[in-house]
Image (spheres, rainbow, N blue to C red):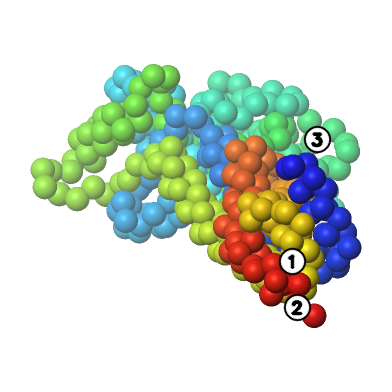
Amino acid sequence: MLWEAIRLAFQTILRNALRSFLTVLGVVIGVAAVIAMVTVGQGSTAKVAADVGALGANLLIVRPGQPQQGPGASAGTAPAFSLRDVDALATQVASVRVAAPASSRQMTVIAGALNRSSTVTGTDNRYLDARGIAVAQGRAFHESEVRTGAATCLLGQTVRRELFGAGDPIGQTLRLKSLACRVIGVAGELGASSFGTDQDDFILIPIRAFQRRISGDADVSLIYAGIRDGVPTEAAKGEIERLMRERRRIGPGEEDDFNVFDMKQIASVLTGITGVLTGLLSAVAGISLLVGGIGIMNIMLVSVTERTREIGVRLAIGATEGQVLTQFLVEAIVLSGLGGLIGVALGLALGAAGAAALSVPFLPDPAIMLLAFGFSAAVGVVFGYFPARRAARMNPIDALRHQ
């Protein structure tokens, strides 16, 4: 009986193919939009987590200035750090595995007849360790180069590509203002971040060379603190704050003139934001399913009116109310089910296109696909029941008189 009802449903749908397609279009759009939004949202969340993780799995960033200034704000009048502060963090805080100094400036870099603006950072090999940056070509700094402030440098992949193309940059010379810098290495590819910045557009030089030849002082703008495995970053953050308050002679009750940023907390906030946005957009898209359900109910009511005489004949020759109810209910479920299948396929295609356009991973969720398809089938049951019940409760004599 059920298979016969399904066969009749397909015959009716194919007999009015265009009308049937327009009827389920709302379901198709709703299912496709939900799947595409969730897929792109999950890819974006994974991209944010990966980008923050690329900065260091357990990384704290210490910088001068009030905490409310935020990670991109200026340190203002707060005194800068020194190399002695960096060494103190590395030796006096047990939870700190490595502490690296960093002072940066945007500069014009010249190589032969080519030039570009890039970020020049004064640091040492501890920076590579803290940030998880590998040396893909050449070598890192020698200890003697760091100690004496030798004019050597490591390039990010973007700088290498823009200034040297396919050529070998090792041993070549760059000019940073009056500083002639010899290239000794090239860092591995980091890629673009979720924030739209190019993580490979940088040049690293020894911190003492930066201080003597570029900044003209002994300041350290940032300290990257890599935390030991198994140590909660909150506990490490508290230890760092206590040491820095002591070294900067901040008394009880006085406000810190530095701040410590936890990259895990930043990742949590960002992934939370993307999750909320994905949920809101998916909820809006889900409204299309309700609209599609109303369309199915409307067309089924029209179908019942058009087929009144057919219903009367079936009832007159012995069909029960249950059989008529089943016929029209199955037809509504088949309509919404077909819309759900088309919507799943379209949603995956749109999700893949969106992930490619935004350069995020394509992470389809089977649970969401099953949920969206199940909801589309439920729409057919809910909105198809009332027209089906109306058909089943017709008086055979009145139905046969209908023209």
Q: Does the rendering let one see residue 200? A: no
Per the image, label 2 sits on a secondary structure element best described as loop
Q: Nearer the viewer, residue 150 or 155?
A: 155
Task: Determine the CA span between mark 3 and mark 2.
Answer: 88 Å
Which residue is labeled 2 in the image? 402
Q: Position of residue 378 (x, y in %)?
A: 59, 51
Q: Is residue 260 left or right of residue 8?
A: left
Q: Amino acid at mark 2?
A: His
User: Is disc 1 surrounded by few (<14), some (14 to 19) or many (20+) residues within 10 Å?
Assistant: many
Q: Which circle marks residue 312 in the picture?
A: 1
Quadrant of the snapshot with the C terminus: bottom right
Q: Quadrant of the N terminus?
A: top right
Would you call the spot at circle 2 few (<14 residues within 10 Å), some (14-19), or many (20 or more)? Answer: some
Residue drawn at x 61%, y 54% as measured from the top left: 381
What residue appears at the point 60 percent right and 38 percent down from the top-left corner? Answer: 367
Q: Label 3 neighbourhood size at 10 Å, few (<14), some (14-19), many (20+)?
A: many
* Discs 3/2, front: 2
User: Decide: marks 1, 2 in contact (CB < 8 A)?
Assistant: yes
Identify the amino acid type marked 1.
Gly
Name the residue carrying label 3: 169
* SS at circle 1: helix
Q: Residue at x 67, y 40 (%)?
A: 364
